[in-house]
Image (spheres, rainbow, N blue to C red):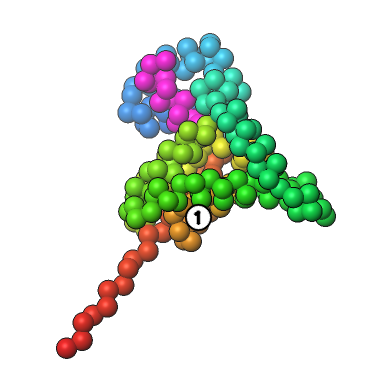
């Protein structure tokens, strides 16, 4: 798959549906070029199109990823995740599950998994600057099947994952795996943020702590 097609798929994965003009503006390409790529992607079954009108004039088409695109272009590494989850379930005492709802049991397992993984990595990251730890945990999320990325912000950093399996399992609720893992790896000030646009993702703000410097007294 060429770079432009991959960029179109990535943009739609991040932000949900876009029309030709929006894609052309975002990728700094001519609309006719975008249309050519969209035609091929739709022909390959990777895109779905929906006609929308603004009350008058010709309809324009909004393009979204198809289920095939989610499965082929952004696959989940379910083999490793299933192995980790099964091991974690095996560590649980039966009494810990008594009286819990199915959802509460799921959250407990995910929290324990995040704790175990963070314990494994914490010694490696000890003493690393915050940005290097942000880069590291983002790569961990990618390796576990996520479409994760990070960026520096005025307040610190932001991490987004647009392909989180656990987000789907919890039917769109805050991903407990990410919340626990990121908090333990990066510090207490990890804040859940809503995703912009109509794309589905887990989005977290990491607020950098400013170290106070004590003034020397004369």
Image coordinates of residue 79 in percent, x first then y, are: 60, 27
Position of the N terminus by quadrant? top left
Which secondary structure, mark 1? helix
Q: Which residue is mark 1?
A: 184
Image coordinates of residue 205 in percent, x first then y, are: 45, 53
Q: Is residue 112 above or below residue 168?
A: below
167 and 197: which is toward the camera: 167
Residue 32 can be seen, yes or no: no
- The magenta segment is 1-18
- Residue in view at x 42 percent, y 22 percent: 6
User: Across the whole image, how many numbered discs are drawn on residues?
Assistant: 1
Magenta-drawn stretch contains 104: no
- Residue in view at x 46 percent, y 46 percent: 121
5 and 122: which is toward the camera: 122
- Residue in view at x 41 percent, y 59 percent: 207
Dominant SS in magenta? helix
Position of the C terminus by quadrant? bottom left
Query: Most extreme residue toward the bottom, as rendered?
Result: 218
């Amino acid at each position: 798959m060429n770079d432009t097609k991959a960029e179109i798929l990535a943009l739609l994965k991040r932000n949900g549906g876009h029309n030709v003009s929006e894609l052309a503006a975002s990728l700094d390409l001519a609309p006719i070029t975008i249309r050519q790529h969209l035609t091929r992607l739709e022909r390959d079954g990777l895109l779905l199109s929906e006609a929308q009108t603004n009350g008058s004039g010709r309809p324009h088409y909004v393009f979204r990823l198809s289920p095939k695109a989610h499965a082929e272009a952004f696959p989940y590494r379910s083999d490793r995740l299933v192995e980790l989850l099964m091991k974690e379930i095996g560590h649980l005492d039966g009494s810990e599950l008594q009286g819990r709802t199915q959802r509460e049991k799921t959250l407990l397992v995910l929290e324990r998994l995040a704790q175990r993984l963070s314990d494994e990595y914490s010694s490696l990251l000890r003493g690393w600057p915050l940005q290097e730890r942000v880069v590291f945990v983002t790569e961990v999320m990618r390796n576990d099947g996520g479409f994760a990325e990070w960026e520096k912000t005025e307040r610190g950093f932001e991490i987004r994952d647009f392909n989180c399996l656990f987000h789907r399992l919890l039917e769109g609720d805050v991903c407990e795996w990410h919340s626990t893992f990121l908090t333990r790896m990066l510090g207490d000030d990890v804040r859940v943020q809503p995703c912009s646009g109509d794309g589905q993702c887990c989005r977290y703000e990491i607020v950098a702590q400013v170290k106070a410097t004590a003034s020397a007294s004369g």
